Image (cartoon, helix red, strand yellow):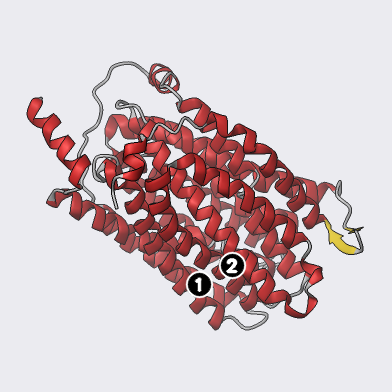
Amino acid sequence: MEETDNRTEEISGSVPVTPEQKRGMRSTILAQCFGCLSFLAFSNSLLLVYLTQLQVSTARIVAYLSLPALGEALLIVPSAFLADRYGKRRIGLAGVTAETLGFGLLTVSGAFTGPLAEAWVVMGAAVFAVGRALFNSSWYALLSPVVPESMRGEFFGRLRFSWQLCGILFAALCAAALPREAPPWIYQVLLAVMTASLVVKFFFYRTIPELEKASDMRGGFWRAMGHVVRAEGFLSFCAYVFLLSLFTAGCPIIFGLVEKDVLKLGDGLVVMLGTVLMIGSVFGFLAGGKAVDRFGTKPAFLVCHFFYGVVLVVFVARAIVPGILVPFIAALSFLFGFVRAISSIAISTELLALMPADNKSLSSSTCMALQTSGGALSGVLAAWALQAGMLSPRWSLRGLEMTAYDSVLLACAAMIVLLVVTLGLVPSVLRKSQWMGHH
């Protein structure tokens, strides 16, 4: 035991990594670089413009694009219980398989029209959601022993920089290949490429070492959940993550709908603006990893709240710059992605520090379930408000013409600013010495 403690202290102080850890981190990055093309399609406007070409209504588009998050929120916790008992990597591999099947169904949907096409879309999104739940249920628990504690912020920054860069390059190629009004078959080709990338992800994921084996703890699901919720500071942090996700996750979809339905931009340009948001995320991951390691999570969250609110309010006031509207929206998309990336790094770092030693998959997935349910509700509530007609389709604010989409964005901005008071729910368990000592 003394030898193990000395080894752990050495890792924390000088950041050496074992060959197995190094191989695991490399495989993690490669797996995500290939896997990102599929899940980014739900947020970078590619699937949004695809569904508009299939003549799906606006409200249903928002609901369909929220299905993976909703399904993941419902299934990730029971999936995590299975991962802790039967093996994290085994459940993760089943998840990648389901993701591949789900995206294959989305690809097939373009061969149909009307309600039949929508049925294939719903089936594909639902199966993909099951896969995301299985895959993500053990993700943080699998990486916890692979990534040394003292370099977690830096690693997650590098990881997300890598897969976001791959996503950006692919989305840029997609935007260049899309004419103003692309036929469905072009999207089918792009979706087929994404499906193939998930097959490659499967083989890289297999090589990530599972350094902590399945738990042999006795007791059922509720006993394990009781252990998780009693962990100090854990549940309050989960509540904060849920609230933050509730008022931020659906905003990129609303951005895309404004660009497509209100500003009447072409398909390629809408996808390109979604790509600009991803470029902002790349730079945010680069800056966020080092910033979180240096200053801690609470300062990062505080800055994110402020800039989230600024971006949404200024986006609503876009009519003040009619001559440079597209560059203006591109700048705001970049800043939103930058802020979202920093917030993501802070959440991941805090989560790894708060996870109890036992039932790691279950604990991390409880937090992720609340985060994804917040994101799913964000889209579902927006879709319900738009479909129910409870928001005025046209109104004015100090001479600026507004739409129902702008009403949703203003409500989100107000709540994000008000949520600053909930930062008291973030324990910030990382020690100051950890924040300052690794540069």
Q: Amino acid at mark 1?
A: Ala
* Residue occupied by mark 1: 171
Say which residue appears at 48% left-offset and 55% top-offset: 102
Say which residue appears at 55% left-offset and 55% top-offset: 339
Badge 1 density bin: few <14, some 14–19, many ≥20, Cα 10 Å: many
Q: Residue furthest left?
A: 3
Badge 2 density bin: few <14, some 14–19, many ≥20, Cα 10 Å: many
Residue 61 shows up from this direction:
no
Lower position in the chain sequence, tag 2 or tag 1: 1
Q: Nearer the viewer, residue 197 or 339?
A: 339
Mark 1 residue element: helix
Q: Are the two marked residues, 2 and 1, in contact with CB atoms closer than 8 angstroms? A: yes
Q: Seen in the image, is 138 located left or right of residue 366? A: left
The quadrant of the rendering that contains the N terminus is top left
Say which residue appears at 61% left-offset and 71% top-offset: 273
Tell me how far mark 2 sits from mark 1, CA to CA.
8 Å
Query: Looking at the image, is 72 positioned above or below residue 270?
Result: above
Q: Seen in the image, is 379 located left or right of residue 289? A: right
Query: Looking at the image, is 188 positioned above or below residue 198?
Result: below
Mark 2 residue element: helix
Q: Amino acid at mark 2?
A: Gly
Query: Looking at the image, is 244 positioned above or below residue 282?
Result: above
Residue 151: x %, y % from top left:
29, 48
Residue 154: x %, y % from top left:
33, 53
Q: Quadrant of residue 241?
A: top right
Residue 121: x %, y % from top left:
59, 58
Residue 398: x %, y % from top left:
91, 59
Q: What numbered label is drawn on residue 274? A: 2
